[in-house]
Image (tube, helix red, strand yellow):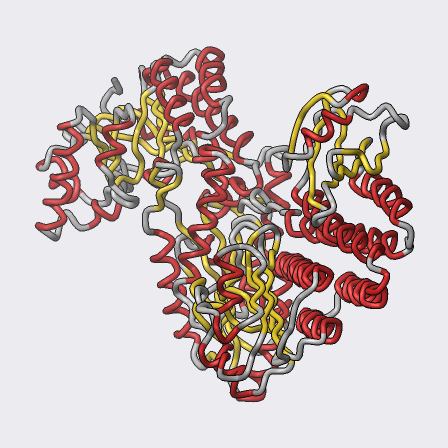
Amino acid sequence: MGRGNNQRRSAGGVENFQAESWTTRQLAEFLSVVSSFTDERDALQGCVERAAAAIGTELAVLIREGKVAAQVGFPSGKEPVADLVEASGDLRFERKLGDLGVCTGMCSLVGEEGTLLVARTGGEDFTKEELDLLRGMGRVLGLALRSIRLIGELRERQTLLERLTLLQRSIASRADIEEVLHAIVTGASELLGDELVDLSLIDPEDPSVLEVVASVGYPPELLGQIRRTPVEVGIAGHAVTERRPIVVEDYGADPRRIPDVAGGGLRAVISAPVYQRGELVGALSLGTRRSGRRYSEIEREAVLAFAEHAGLALNDAKAAEETAHQAFHDPLTGLANRALFVDRLAQARTRAAAAGDAVGILFADLDGFKNVNDSLGHAAGDQLLIIVGQRLASVVGPTDTVARFGGDEFAILVEDVRQPIELARMARMALDGIERVIDVEGREVFITASIGIAVGLEGPDDLLRNADMAMYEAKGQGKGRYEIFQRHMHEALAQRLELELDLKRAADRDQFVLHFQPIVEMDTPMVIGVEALIRWMHPAQGLILPDRFIPIAEESGQIHPLGRWVLWEACRQVVEWEDAYGGLGLNVNISGAQLRQASLVREVAETLEATGLEPDRLTLEITESVLMEVSSSNTERLDALKRLGVQLAVDDFGTGYSSLQYLKRFPFDWLKIAKPFVDGVDGSDSQARIARAIVDLAHSLEIEVIAEGIESRRQAAVLGEVGCLNGQGFHYSPPLPADEVSAYIATRAPAR
C-alpha cells in the first residue's frame, strides 16, 4: 500500500488564525497607547512610534496639511518632506526617501486629520494583515485626535475606547461569535443612543440577500420584515453595494428606505460596510425614532470603528473555524480524518446499541496506487485521491461518513445496519465507481481498490482492525474486490505475518528453487522453450506456490532481489542445457514493481552478458494488469529492453482490459492466451471463436501466440485449428524441477 505518500499537512488555517490573532493583539495595544494620551502632540508622536514598532518598520510618519506632524526614522529637521508628502498620496509605494534610500511603504488615512505612512528598507513587501492593521490604526488615531481636541466629547471618546477594548478582549479570548456580535450592536446602541441597531451579512448561499445576524431594539414584527432583504434594498444594502458609509437624517423622505421600516417611525439611519479579510461581507446600521437627529464626526467615526471590530470578530471566528476544521478533516480531500471518523463511530455505536442495530465499516485501500505516484508524480497522485474521495462520497447516504485515513486508505462509516448485504451492495457500488477511467492531468488512469467490511458493535479499534483484515483478505484474493470480515481472518492474518517474516530469511537459507514448464510447438510437438517459475521450499509448510508469497514480496520490497535471482538462475540453467538440447528459449515473468525499477534494463544486460545467453532467446512476460499501470518512463524501459534484443510477451491476455491500444503501443513479440479462454475451446463454439479472434488479432499485429493451461489433446487440436501454433500446460508437462524437465525434454523431439 502507498501509505503516507500523499498525506499533506496544510498549515494555512493555523497561519491565518495566528495572523488574525496578531492583528487583534497589535490593534488592542495601539488602542491602549492612544487612550493614554490627552495632549495632541504627545499622541501623534506616541502613535507613530507604536505604529513603527507594531508593524516592524524603520520609518513612521504622520503627514498633515502638507507637513510632517510627527515622525520616527529621521533626525529632527532632516525629514525629506516633499518626498514624504508625495508618497502619502499612494496606498502602497516604493521610492527613495532621504538618507534611508529606496523604501517600500504603505499609507492609511487618519480620518480627515492626514495620512499615516510607514516604510521599511530592504524591499520586503507588506502583508494584507499589516495593511489591515495600519488601516485600523489610522481609524483609531483619527478618532483619538478628534477626541483630544473635542474636550466636550471626552466622555464619549473614553466610553468608546473602553467599549472597543472590551470587544478586543472578547475577540482575543475566543468568546462565542454570537456573543461578540451581540456586544457590538449593544455597545453601539448604548454609546450613540440609537435604539435600533443591526448587523447584516451577505448570505454565503445566496449573495443577493442580506441577513440580520445580530440586532437590538427591533420589535419582533419589524425584525421579521427586515431579517432577509435583497442586497440592493435599504440603507444597509446601499452601504454594501456602494462600499461606503451612508448617513440619512430624513429617513422617511429617502428613496432608498424600506417602506415597512419607514412605517415603524424611523427618522435617521447611519450604516457602515463590514469587511472580512478584505472582502465586503455586510453592514452595521444604527437608527432612531428621535426627530432632529444629527450624526457628529465623532459618532460617524464610532460607527466605523464598531463596523471594523465586527469584521475583526468575523475574521477571528473564521480563523478558529478553519483551525477546528483542519483538526478533524483531511487537508487534501476535505473528507473527515481518522480522529473525526473514530469519534463519529463511537457515537454511532451508542445509538445503534440503543436501537438494536449495528454499525458498519468499509475500509478501502487502492491497489497499485504507488505506481501512480512513481510514474506520474505526486501531484497526479493527489488529484487521483481527490477524485476517488468524491466517488466514494457519491455512494453513501446523508448520515454516513467518508474519511481518508492517510496515503491511499479510505473508510466509510454506515449507521443503522441490519444486514451485512447492505454494506456489500455499497462496496460493489464503490468499487464500480473507482474502477471507471479517471482523467489525471490529461492521462487516462485505471485503478482498483480492495475493500474490507466489518459489521457489529465492537469498540472502534476492534471494528477498524476487523475491516482492515477483511481488506487484506480481499487483496489476497486478487484485489479489485471486497470481503466481509470472518473470525477465521484473525488466524489468516497471523499466518500471513509469520509468512512475511519467514520470507525475509528464505533467500539467505537457499529455500527458493526454480521449476520449468516446457513450451511446445503443438503440431510436432517440439520443445521450443521453457518458462521459469519460482517455488519456495518452506521448511515447515513444504512447497509454496508464488501466488502466496509474491504479493507479500511486492508489498515488502523483497521482489527486487528475488526477481534478480530468478533471472540469473534461469539464464544460467538454460545455457547449461545448450550442449544437450540446443538453443532453448527462456520465458521469465517480471512484476510491475520490477518494471518500475530504473535499474531493470542494466540488470538484464549484465545477466545476459555474465551467463552468455543470447538476448533473443530471453522473453520477459508482463501481465495485462501491469500494462495498465505503465508510465512513459516504463514505456522507455520496454523500448530499451527491445534494443538489447530481448523479446517481450503479454501474459494472461484476456484477464485484464484486453485493450488493442496497449498491443499497438508496446513492442510485443508474443501474446499468451490466458487459461480461462483455453478451458472451454473443446466444448463451446463461442469459446473457440473467441480464441480465433485473439489469434487473428495478434497475427494482424505480427505478434506470435502461445496458449497457456492446455490440459487435453482436444484443446490442443482446436487451438491448432484456429491458428495457435505454440502452447504449454499439463497436457504436455506440469512445471518441473530442473533435472526432471531436462529428462522430459530428452524424451521429446530435438529442440530447436
User: In this picture, is 647 found above or below 390?
Assistant: above
Q: Is residue 711 visible?
A: yes
Residue situated in front as seen by the camera: 368 or 397: 397
Which residue corresponds to the image point at 46% horizontal and 39% vertical from the top-left?
380
* Residue 536 percent location from the top left of the image: 52, 40
| Image label count | 0
User: In this picture, is 508 found above or below 325?
Assistant: above
Could you tell me which quadrant the C terminus lies in? top left
Residue placed furthest toward the front: 292
* Residue 612 percent location from the top left of the image: 43, 11
* Residue 322: quarter of image: bottom right
246 horizontally vs 581: left or right: right
User: In this picture, is 453 found above or below 630?
Assistant: below
Residue situated in front as seen by the camera: 505 or 424: 424
Residue situated in front as seen by the camera: 592 or 393: 393
Residue situated in front as seen by the camera: 731 or 230: 230
* Residue 434 percent location from the top left of the image: 38, 53
Which residue corresponds to the image point at 65% horizontal and 43% vertical from the top-left?
128
Q: Is residue 306 visible?
A: no
222 horizontally vs 30: left or right: left
* Residue 55 percent location from the top left of the image: 78, 40
Which residue corresponds to the image point at 59% horizontal and 42% vertical from the top-left?
503
User: In this picture, is 274 found above or below 384?
Assistant: below
38 horizontally vs 6: left or right: right
